Image (cartoon, rainbow, N blue to C red):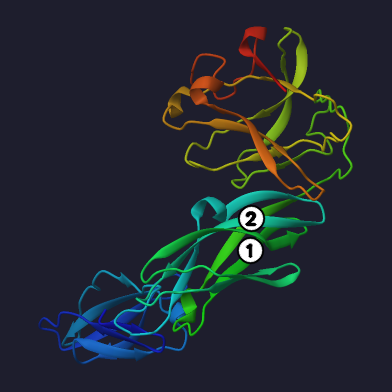
Amino acid sequence: MKQFCPNEIQLTWDKSAKDSFLLYKLGDKYMEPFATSGTNSISIPITNPRDLKWVSVAGYKGDVLSKRNKAIEIPQTLVNCPVDADAKLNLVSASSQQVKLNCDITNIDAAVKIYNLTANPIDSFIIGALSSEGVRQHKFIKQIKGFDSLSLSVNNLISSKGSGDAIIPVWIDIVNDGFRYNDTSQLSFYLTAVKDKIGVYPLIEGFDSDQLPLKWEFYDPVHEKSWAVSQVKSNSNTESNAIYYSNKTFGYIGTKTYLYSQTVDLNSAIEPYLYFNLAYHMDGRALNFLDSVKIKVVSVCGSDESETQIIQLYSNLLSTVDTSSSTDWSPQKAADWQNYPLT
């Protein structure tokens, strides 16, 4: 790539012994021809740089077309195109996918990284987002040196309501920005509606029904595994119901599934505690795919939307029985359970 400017791209390649060249770009699914050249270079006018993602070239010798060369990706930054100012905003990966509980309207916190792509310092900038209440913006008086970057936590700027998948555009605005097509990122998350906004106290759940409790909620992005209720041997060696999760799709490394209890009203609680029993079996065919469990207390339906992690257990600490290849394991005796009292 010789040059990439907002309205034009210049490409060069080895000519070899070809008579002419056919250029390809990535379409919806496949590489598609879009331009020809009689030399080993071409200047292509562009109206929207986002339409050009990957390009490749093949050469004609007579009527015979050669194999395409390896495709190159069009960068998100300008190449050999002088501009006075250019900034790029990326969402930090840890904040780009999340699940949030929602009462009426929920604020979403995000972590962003801003890149100054020129030698000139940036003294101030605006970060904006198109939330469910319209456009929200905040101006930051912070300097980013030339070709440097800055990480920020963006709070009280992004909001959403309802339930289901949501995509919120988040962007940066600087004075005299010479390239607008790398300013925006998409924040994707899933909203789970709170089924009980008032809550109960105490919350005692024996999973007596044959399905999830009515006011509990779960979210599973893979949809090949889910939470369910089953009758098992309890920690007192009697038949009892328990909620269980069986994961037989070992390939979804890092995928999280979420289970939310009914809302608990702690306004009048004195020294509240959480008590539960846990049994875990690890499939011996998937020893390299480690599971983990996190338990958090999440504040909802008020001015405080914080969350506090109170426990995290990994496979080696989760296991309450020996590893085997059983695919339909369930607790068989009291010793298969561990109890966890938390205050």
Residue 167's mark? 1
**What kind of element bears circle 1?**
strand
Query: Nearest the camera: 95 or 148?
Result: 148
Residue type pointed to by label 1: Ile
Give the image location of residue 3, x and y in percent: 29, 83
- Above or below residue 128? Residue 326 is above
Q: Please tell me which residue lies in front, 83 or 73.
A: 83
Q: Foreground: 262 or 14?
A: 262
Answer with left or right where residue 175 lies relative to residue 38: right
Percent coordinates x, y for residue 237 in the rendering: 72, 7
The quadrant where residue 121 appears: bottom left
Q: Quadrant of residue 212?
A: top right
Please report the residue visible at 33 percent of the width from the left and 84 percent of the height from the top.
81
On screen, 343 above or below 68? above
Q: Please identify the residue farthest to the left as the structure is shown.
A: 17
Q: Secondary structure at mark 2?
A: strand
Q: Disc count in the image? A: 2
Q: Is residue 154 left or right of residue 205?
A: left
Residue 261 in the image: state x and y as whole percent.
Answer: 77, 35
Up the image or down, 34 lies above or below 118; here it is: below
Q: Quadrant of the N terminus?
A: bottom left
Q: Position of residue 91 (x, y in %)?
A: 52, 60
Q: Which residue is mark 2?
A: 109
- Mark 1 or 2, nearer chain start: 2
Dot 2 amino acid type: Asp
- Foreground pick, 284 / 289: 289
**How far apart are the alpha carbons under marks 1 and 2?**
14 Å
